[in-house]
Image (cartoon, grey):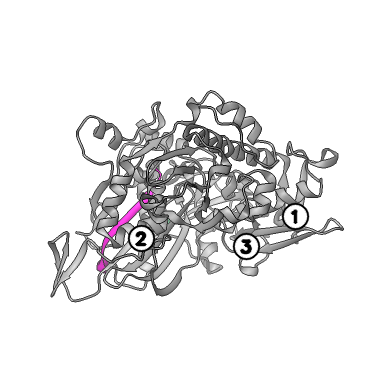
């Protein structure tokens, strides 16, 4: 007799006493490790979705983990029969794409002007020699998201994009949103969040098709919490009213001239050149980070005459409104629901995720799955489609209630019930609240700027999630405003684009530093109508302009 252990959708019969890690190896599943199963590196995390009881209890090296997270080298089969389902932190496929980057999104071509230069065999950062080599010069742009981390490798001399990769932020074991990560970091000494992330980033860098020591600069963008955890700053103050990062506090006290951060490759614990510079883009305020600043750079906001809005929907949704004369930015703590987090069958937009949903007249579902694999879960764009279709076919009302008092709608039936992909009414409730926060953010930001939705000339839907959204479905459920579709532009991950621009151009990096100083931060929770907007936004119906009132 044996337990059926399903890891990342693949199953194996696992005998008593075997570790989850050993079973994953039998299935040829790559589990991150740098300690050879000694319980030291803390990288071999798995999330146990079902069957935790059939595993041994947590061991000493797992003291830092709680809930459904385990170290796979420590968790062993403790029963003779049963079913365990778990997955490793998920990874996107590395893409090797050798082409020059035609940035920014605006019409101006980017002039290459990197901080790392070559003078014969001398490699210099801002004119200071860091190495003698005739080899290539590389840099990495990083978008450190609460849920997903994206790395992009570029040749700093040609501007050529060499490869990019993404993975689920392994810090999920410390909570799915920034506030829980702040609490985790404060309660657990030892910088466990930073070390675990550095382990995953190191693996990603080592898999790039270049010598890691040829990487001389990194530009990191992320919300203030993600950035500051990576740069070993205390994040405690970001979690306390008035929600400011240490760098903002120090800048206000005149102790620093910018909120950007720098450290060496050595200190970052990454396998890049030890004297490499790791630059953390400046943050705008406690919860409006360098990723929002990078978005502005990517859409060339410093030179924009038109009135534009940028909405980067994520665990923390960034909202930016303005043009070259005035910019206002806000951040909505929407939570991870639209990135598949906190949803029963939610998952990131990786292979096996349902990304499109249509309901036929006979009530059957037509599902589009990333990678044409059997469905394992549903990602954000699939959720938006599913909600829109349920609404259109009146199987769900605008309050998010299913017809006939049902609690669950099954989208896909697997071979065993454990493999079903479904939506619960409680999932819809999570999505309603995430949407409510986004909509409230939009109303407050527009209201504070003194405009309504119709004044906007271009509405950029940014972010990996925003790129794949069905715009009409998003308008139907009220995730994006009811604007003419010709005004809405899905521009993909502008944060990584902005980071890449700042990596390839010193002058653009300077522009980013200056842009941040001029942004007006809008604190959503201080608006007198915030709660009303939130409640209204929780309903699944189109978002119409409201009269401006500051
Ligand atoms: S493999 Fe290093 S802690 Fe499990």
- Label 1, ligand 1: CB separation under 8 Å: no
Q: Is residue 131 magenta?
A: no
Is residue 55 visible in this depiction of the protein? no
Give the mark nearest the N terminus, 1 or 2.
Answer: 1
Q: Element type at marker 3?
A: loop
Whether tag 3 and tag 2 are in contact, CB under 8 A, the answer is no
Give the mark nearest the N terminus, 3 or 1.
Answer: 3
Q: Nearer the viewer, mark 1 or mark 2?
A: 2
The span from disc 3 to disc 1 (Cα, nearest Å) is: 14 Å
The span from disc 1 to disc 2 (Cα, nearest Å) is: 39 Å
Check disc 3 and report the residue beneath it: 352
**Left or right: 130 with respect to 61?**
left
- In the image, residue 247 lies at what x, y percent? 28, 37
Q: Element type at marker 1?
A: strand
Check disc 1 and report the residue beneath it: 411
Image mark for residue 500: 2
Q: Is residue 218 magenta?
A: yes
- In the image, residue 417 lies at what x, y percent? 75, 54
**Left or right: 100 with respect to 306?**
left
Residue drawn at x 46%, y 68% as measured from the top left: 94
Classify 411 as above or below 431.
below
Q: Nearer the viewer, mark 3 or mark 2?
A: 2
- In the image, residue 23 lies at what x, y percent? 55, 63
Classify 7 as above or below 176.
below
**Left or right: 504 with respect to 165?**
left
For the N terminus, the image quarter is bottom right
Q: Which sits in the foreground, 93 or 286?
A: 286
The span from disc 3 to disc 2 (Cα, nearest Å) is: 29 Å
Q: Which sits in the foreground, 500 or 548?
A: 548
> What span is in magenta?
213-223
Q: Element type at marker 2?
A: helix
């Amino acid at each position: 007799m044996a337990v059926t252990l399903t890891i990342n959708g693949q199953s194996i019969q696992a005998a008593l006493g075997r570790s989850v890690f050993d079973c994953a190896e039998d299935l040829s599943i790559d589990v991150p490790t740098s300690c050879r199963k000694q319980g030291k590196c803390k990288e071999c995390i798995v999330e146990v979705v079902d069957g935790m009881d059939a595993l041994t209890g947590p061991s000493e090296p797992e003291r830092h983990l709680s809930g459904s997270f385990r170290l796979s080298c420590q968790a062993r089969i403790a029963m003779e029969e049963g079913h365990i389902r778990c997955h490793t932190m998920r990874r996107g496929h590395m893409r090797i794409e050798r082409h020059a980057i035609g940035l920014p999104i605006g019409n101006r071509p980017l002039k290459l002007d990197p901080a790392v230069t070559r003078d014969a065999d001398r490699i210099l950062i801002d004119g200071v020699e860091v190495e003698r080599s005739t080899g290539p010069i590389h840099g990495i742009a990083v978008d450190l998201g609460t849920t997903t981390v994206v790395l992009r490798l570029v040749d700093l001399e040609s501007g050529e994009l060499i490869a990019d990769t993404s993975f689920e932020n392994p810090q999920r074991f410390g909570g799915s949103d920034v506030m829980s990560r702040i609490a985790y970091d404060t309660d657990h000494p030892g910088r466990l969040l930073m070390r675990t992330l550095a382990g995953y980033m190191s693996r990603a860098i080592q898999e790039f098709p270049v010598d890691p020591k040829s990487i001389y600069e990194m530009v990191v963008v992320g919300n203030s919490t993600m950035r500051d955890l990576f740069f070993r700053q205390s994040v405690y103050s970001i979690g306390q009213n008035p929600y400011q990062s240490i760098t903002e506090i120090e800048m206000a006290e005149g102790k620093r001239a910018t909120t950007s951060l720098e450290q060496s490759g050595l200190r970052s614990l990454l396998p890049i050149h030890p004297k490499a510079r790791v630059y953390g883009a400046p943050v705008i305020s406690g919860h409006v980070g360098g990723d929002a600043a990078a978005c502005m750079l990517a859409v060339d906001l410093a030179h924009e005459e038109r009135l534009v809005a940028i909405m980067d929907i994520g665990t923390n949704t960034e909202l930016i409104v303005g043009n070259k004369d005035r910019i206002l930015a806000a951040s909505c703590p929407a939570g991870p629901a639209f990135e598949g987090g906190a949803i029963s069958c939610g998952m990131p937009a990786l292979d096996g995720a349902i990304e499109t949903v249509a309901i036929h007249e006979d009530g059957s579902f037509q599902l589009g799955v990333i990678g044409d694999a059997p469905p394992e879960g549903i990602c954000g764009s699939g959720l938006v489609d599913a909600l829109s279709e349920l609404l259109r076919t009146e199987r769900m009302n605008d309050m998010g209630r299913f017809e006939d008092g049902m609690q669950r709608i099954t989208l896909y039936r697997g071979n065993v019930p454990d493999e079903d992909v479904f939506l619960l009414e409680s999932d819809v409730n999570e999505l309603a609240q995430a949407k409510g926060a986004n909509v409230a953010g939009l109303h407050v930001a527009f209201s504070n700027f003194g405009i309504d939705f119709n004044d906007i000339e271009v509405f950029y839907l940014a972010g990996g999630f925003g790129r794949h959204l069905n715009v009409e479905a998003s308008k139907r459920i009220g995730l994006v405003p009811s604007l003419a579709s010709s005004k809405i532009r899905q521009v993909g991950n502008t944060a990584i684009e902005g980071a890449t621009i700042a990596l390839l151009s010193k002058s653009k990096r300077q522009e980013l530093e200056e842009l941040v100083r001029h942004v007006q931060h809008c604190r959503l929770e201080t608006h007198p109508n915030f709660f009303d907007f939130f409640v209204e936004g929780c309903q699944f119906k189109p978002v119409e302009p409201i009269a401006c009132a500051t």
